[in-house]
Image (spheres, rainbow, N blue to C red):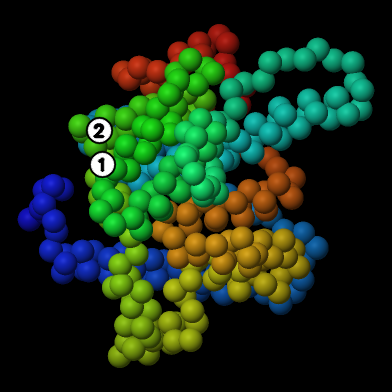
């Protein structure tokens, strides 16, 4: 039976959980490597097509679940915010900037709400400074705070929520906070999708999950010593432990049409800075993906903006069907 969060878990339970997480991580990375290897060809094409089929916003409340969304849901919703920011920049911001650069006479139209404030709240990096911290200017992102909490002795889900409230709990220029913390329930709400989609997150065991346990790092060695040659051959000397990004880079390295992608995967910013961080892998991989997408000619296949009758305070009213929000 699972112990209450207030009681310390047995060391063997934590070790087993970490080992299972590492096993899944390595199995997934190996699968990606084998797929890329089977698709790889030596002919250097002049062009390529990248199809990105990303999951939509994850909100367990829509499915009737009251327990709150998980850390995995936060990562997927963060990916959606980054994709919406790319759409916002390419559709609105860049077009209006081009009109200004070319001195075109036009009537300025107010832009839709930018996803940038939510993105900054999740992934903004603020270098450590000496002296007192200014919580108004040094608002580091949730992923970075979780990473820091994972290495602090004595840190817990409660101290993580305290920092979220401290940095992001104040009212912003739009009249309300982007996040609301309910510490007694170990939960907080982020207002996604231009503030029309409040998502409730449950942070139970987030700090523990963010920590890299020693058993997580021995998975590759165990798999490399497998008595099954088909398994051992995949993990022996391949360095699969790094991440899916390094595996994808090696598979695409010689492909001219994807050279920008392979170069991004092997860039120092993504490979040397906190390479093993569980919290920040999502950010680094999305940085690479966004850089790749910006170099392409983009077409968007969009679903309708998700609507939810808000039961939580702070969400902006949903646009009426007669006046839809540009997407």
Observer-nearest of 66 and 153: 153
Q: Please rate how many residues cluster around mark 2, counting C-alpha atoms within 10 Å: few if below 14, some from 14 to 19, many from 20.
A: some
Q: Quadrant of the C terminus?
A: top right
Observer-nearest of 244 and 150: 150
| Displayed quadrant of residue 279 | bottom left
Q: Describe the element under mark 2 as helix, strand or loop.
A: helix
* Residue 64 visible in the shown view: yes
Q: Residue furthest right?
A: 103
Discs 2, 1 touching: Cβ within 8 Å: yes
Observer-nearest of 4 and 311: 4
Picture coordinates of residue 228 (x, y %)?
33, 88
Residue on which disc 2 sits = 183
Q: Say which residue appears at 60% left-offset and 27% top-offset.
A: 114
Picture coordinates of residue 284 (x, y %)?
55, 55
Q: Describe the element under mark 1 as helix, strand or loop.
A: helix
Q: Say which residue appears at 45% left-offset and 20% top-offset.
A: 171
Q: Is residue 260 left or right of residue 21?
A: right
Q: Is residue 109 left or right of residue 23?
A: right
Residue on which disc 1 sits = 158
Q: CA distance from mark 2 to mark 1?
A: 7 Å
- Work out whether 43 lies above or below 183: below
| Displayed quadrant of residue 85 | top right
* Residue 78 visible in the shown view: no
Q: Say which residue appears at 26% left-offset and 41% top-offset.
A: 158
Q: Residue furthest left?
A: 1
Q: Say which residue appears at 77% left-offset and 59% top-offset.
A: 47
Picture coordinates of residue 5 (x, y %)?
15, 48
- Numbered label attached to residue 5: none
Q: Total marks drawn?
A: 2
Q: Is residue 296 left or right of residue 325?
A: right
Q: Is residue 149 left or right of residue 104?
A: left
């Amino acid at each position: 039976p699972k112990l209450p969060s207030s009681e310390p878990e047995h060391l063997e339970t934590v070790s087993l959980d970490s080992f299972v997480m590492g096993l899944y991580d390595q199995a997934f990375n190996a699968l990606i490597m084998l797929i890329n290897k089977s698709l790889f060809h030596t002919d250097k094409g002049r062009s390529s097509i990248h199809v990105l089929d990303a999951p939509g916003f994850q909100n367990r409340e829509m499915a009737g679940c009251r327990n709150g969304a998980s850390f995995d849901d936060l990562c997927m919703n963060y990916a959606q915010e980054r994709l919406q920011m790319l759409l916002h920049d390419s559709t609105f911001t860049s077009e209006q900037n081009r009109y200004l650069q070319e001195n075109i006479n036009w009537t300025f139209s107010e832009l839709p709400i930018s996803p940038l404030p939510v993105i900054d709240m999740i992934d903004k990096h603020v270098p450590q400074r000496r002296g007192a911290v200014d919580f108004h200017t040094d608002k580091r992102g949730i992923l970075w705070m979780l990473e820091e909490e994972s290495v602090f002795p004595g840190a817990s889900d409660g101290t993580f929520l305290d920092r979220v409230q401290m940095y992001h709990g104040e009212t912003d220029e739009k009249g309300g906070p982007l996040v609301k913390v309910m510490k007694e329930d170990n939960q907080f709400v982020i207002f996604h999708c231009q503030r029309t989609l409040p998502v409730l997150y449950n942070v139970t065991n987030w700090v523990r999950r963010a920590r890299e346990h020693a058993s997580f790092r021995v998975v590759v060695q165990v798999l490399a010593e497998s008595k099954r040659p088909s398994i051992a051959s995949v993990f022996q000397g391949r360095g699969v432990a790094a991440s899916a990004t390094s595996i994808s880079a090696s598979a695409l390295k010689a492909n001219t049409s994807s050279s920008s992608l392979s170069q991004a995967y092997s860039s120092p910013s993504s490979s040397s800075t906190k390479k093993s961080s569980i919290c920040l892998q999502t950010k680094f991989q999305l940085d690479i993906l966004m850089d790749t997408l910006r170099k392409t000619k983009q077409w968007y296949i969009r679903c309708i903006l998700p609507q939810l009758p808000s039961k939580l305070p702070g969400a902006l009213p949903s646009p009426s069907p007669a006046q839809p929000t540009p997407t």
